[in-house]
Amino acid sequence: MKDFVLEKKRLLGRLAELDRRMHDIEAELDAPHSRDWEELAVEREGDEVLESLGANSQQEVARIRAALARIREKTYGDCVVCGDAVAAERLQVLPDTPFCQACAARKA
């Protein structure tokens, strides 16, 4: 069984990055808005984009936390559906993935 120290470090780094991003988004959303109607409309559109980015970040945080839990449980790198090993190349690209390529394709 591989130790996955580097993978854990990468996941923790990404988690910290997402935490900073979500704090920045929250600060931007809490900022006072313009009183001008046209500017307010543009700001509202920007807020919708920020809210979407925040939601995507929260989903990624959940996936990373699940991957970190799998590292602690020594099941990281094993597909949660079939139990086969997830290819190292796949984990390089998608370090938080719980699925091997075949199960991910069936899920999609």
Image (cartoon, rainbow, N blue to C red):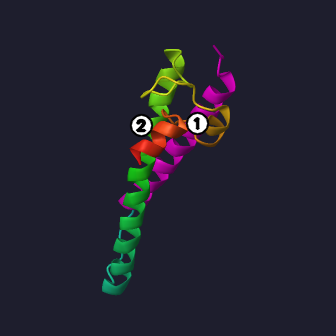
Q: Residues within 10 Å of mark 2 (few under 14, many from 20)?
A: some
Asked if residue 9 lies left or right of residue 60, the reply is right
Disc 1 and disc 2 in contact, CB within 8 angstroms = no
- Name the residue rendered at 47%, 41% in the picture: 104
In the image, is residue 84 above or below residue 108? Answer: above
Q: Secondary structure at mark 1?
A: loop
Which labelled disc corresponds to residue 95? Answer: 1
Place of residue 98 in the rendered image (x, y in percent of width and height, measured from the top left): 48, 32
Asked if residue 2 lies left or right of residue 68, the reply is right
Question: 107 or 73, which is in the foreground?
Answer: 107
Question: 9 or 101, which is in the foreground?
Answer: 101
Asked if residue 87 lies left or right of residue 52, the reply is right
Region in magenta: 1-30
Amino acid type at image mark 1: Pro
Q: Secondary structure at mark 2?
A: helix
Depth-wise, is mark 1 or mark 2 nearer the camera?
1
Residue 66 is covered by the magenta coloring: no
Place of residue 99 in the rendered image (x, y in percent of width and height, measured from the top left): 49, 34
Q: Residues within 10 Å of mark 1 (few under 14, many from 20)?
A: many
Residue linked to disc 2? 62
Place of residue 59 in the rendered image (x, y in percent of width and height, measured from the top left): 41, 44
Q: Earlier in the sequence, mark 1 or mark 2?
A: 2
Residue 10 is covered by the magenta coloring: yes
Place of residue 88 in the rendered image (x, y in percent of width and height, measured from the top left): 66, 32
